[in-house]
Amino acid sequence: MLLDELKSRSENKCELCNSTQELSVYEVPPVEIPNQDNSILVCSVCKGQIEKTEQIDPEHWKVLGDSMWSPYLPVQVVAWRMLSRLRNEAWAANNLDILYLDDDAIAWAKKTGDHEAEANVEFHQDANGTRLFEGDTVVLVKTLDVKGSSISAKLGTVVKNIRLVPDNTEQIEGKIEGQTIVILTKYLRKG
């Protein structure tokens, strides 16, 4: 089993930061068939930041100065991607300068385009800056006229089971009076 193979290879530690807490397999994209040559063992902190479900903490990633020298290519590729995302940090830029990957490894590392992304990740947030998640319940903080409809969504209206608009962190979708509408996050608070 892949998890057992990676635990054995990594001595049951995150291959990026050496944590022993909440370990799981991370398949380094793009992956068709997961195996030891395209997967690594990571902790939940690393995984959340790699997958952009959590904000990147540059201090956490200073360990890449050691893990980038791993003999395992998928570890090197993820280290290169994360260092690239943190390239505005002097220590990350210095590590990128000395990290050597052959042409095939660089091609794999660049394949997702993740290296071009900034370290900062934007999330859907309500008017108070509280992070919103798919399925949350929110409350309108302003009366809104719904364009193209006779509905007027009143202040205090509860909207249950919201859906996050994938490409726009300033919008969510929700149902008011049975009609699905798009609502700007600045006009709601988590309920």
Image: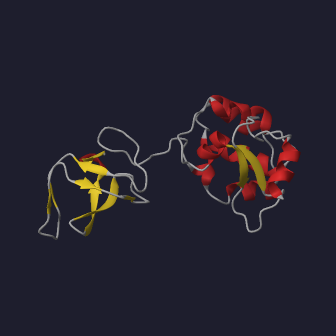
The picture places residue 115, in percent across and down from the top left corner, at: 63, 50
Residue 72 position within the rendered picture, expressed as x and y whole percent measured from the top left? 85, 48
Q: Position of residue 162 (x, y in %)?
A: 36, 58
Query: 139 or 36: which is nearer to us?
Result: 139
Q: Residue at x 58, y 35 (%)?
A: 88
Measured along the vertical axis of the image, is residue 184 above or below residue 125? below
Q: What colouring does the structure picture have?
A: secondary structure
Quadrant in the picture for the N terminus? bottom right
The image shows residue 165 at horizontal and vertical percentages of: 39, 60
Asked if 62 appears above or below 76 in the picture, the reply is above
Instruction: Report whether 185 appears left or right of 122.
Output: left
Image vertical order of residue 148 relative to residue 73, above or below? below
Residue 87 location, quadrant: top right
Q: How many marks?
A: 0
As displayed, is residue 91 above or below residue 139? above
The answer to which image quadrant residue 111 occupies is bottom right
Q: Nearer the viewer, residue 113 or 8?
A: 8
Q: Nearer the viewer, residue 133 or 55?
A: 133
Identify the residue at image location x=63%, y=39%: 45
174 displayed left or right of 43: left
**41 lies left or right of 140:** right
User: Which residue is rendered at x = 74% and y = 58% of the image?
Assistant: 108
Asked where in the image residue 13 lies, by quadrant, the reply is: top right
